[in-house]
Image (cartoon, rainbow, N blue to C red):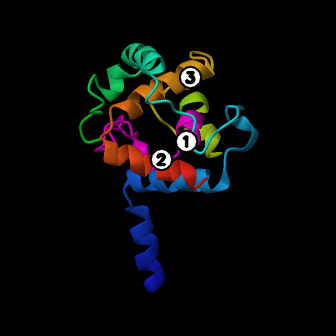
Amino acid sequence: MASKKTSRAKRSMPNVVVLATILSGVLAAGLGGMLYATDRSSAGLLRPDDRVIVVQGKAIYAEQCASCHGNSLEGQPNWREANENGRLPAPPHDETGHTWHHADEVLFGVTKYGLAQIANMPDYQTDMPVFKDVLSDEEIIAALSYIKSCWPAQIRQMHDQRNAMK
């Protein structure tokens, strides 16, 4: 009887929990050779204190990301619940979302290659485009750096701690 309850609980688990679990697993396993190859300091890939990169990233974000994730990084309404086509709406990238819960390399990999490829889930459906043929590695890092530059100091510190754990 307990196994029926467990399987029922797993089936009813919200999509956002599944997504967070997948991303955590990807982080734990590492992204191997698919990631941006560079000398990485313990600070991570992102450069939220570099004004030139952040200004470039703000422009890239406005052009490529804001239509879904919002001009103020607020995301779409009800982002934790699947929409009518069964996909999760765009999450916020401000401190209220889960973006800062993931190390730079995961954020980079998901942006460049998409969650389906990074998590080895070819059937995973999302409205998030893959940017490997749209943005250069530097442009992806700039957009993500802009996002991080908008977070409060405490959230940035927690994100830095996640990067240090890799």
Q: Which is nearer the N-term, disc 3 or disc 2?
A: 3
Determine contact: label 1, label 2, CB under 8 Å. yes
Gap in Å between the C-alphas at discs 1 and 2?
Answer: 6 Å
Q: Nearer the viewer, residue 118 or 158?
A: 158
Image side of residue 31 versus residue 128, left or right: right
Determine contact: label 1, label 3, CB under 8 Å. no
Residue type at mark 1?
Ala
Q: Which is nearer the N-term, disc 1 or disc 3?
A: 1
Q: Residue 154: percent from the left, percent from the top?
A: 33, 48
Is residue 66 depicted above or below 6 in this figure? above
Q: Secondary structure at mark 2?
A: helix
Residue type at mark 3?
Phe
Q: Among all residues in the image, which is located at the extreme left?
A: 77
Residue neighbourhood size for the residue with mark 3, other residues' Cα within 10 Å, grouped as few (<14), some (14–19), many (≥20):
some
Which residue shows up at 35% across the image and 46% down it? 155
Is residue 140 depicted above or below 46 in this figure? above
Gap in Å between the C-alphas at discs 1 and 3?
Answer: 24 Å
Per the rendered image, the range of residues in magenta is 81-110
Q: Among all residues in the image, which is located at the extreme right?
A: 33
Taking the magenta stretch, the answer to whether it contains residue 95 is: yes
Question: Mark on residue 160?
Answer: 2
Q: Secondary structure at mark 3?
A: loop
Which residue in the structure is indicated by mark 1? Answer: 43
Which residue shows up at 46% across the image and 16% down it? 52
Q: Residue 134: percent from the left, percent from the top?
A: 57, 15
Which residue in the structure is indicated by mark 3? Answer: 131
Q: Residue 84: percent from the left, percent from the top?
A: 32, 37
Image side of residue 23 versus residue 74, left or right: right
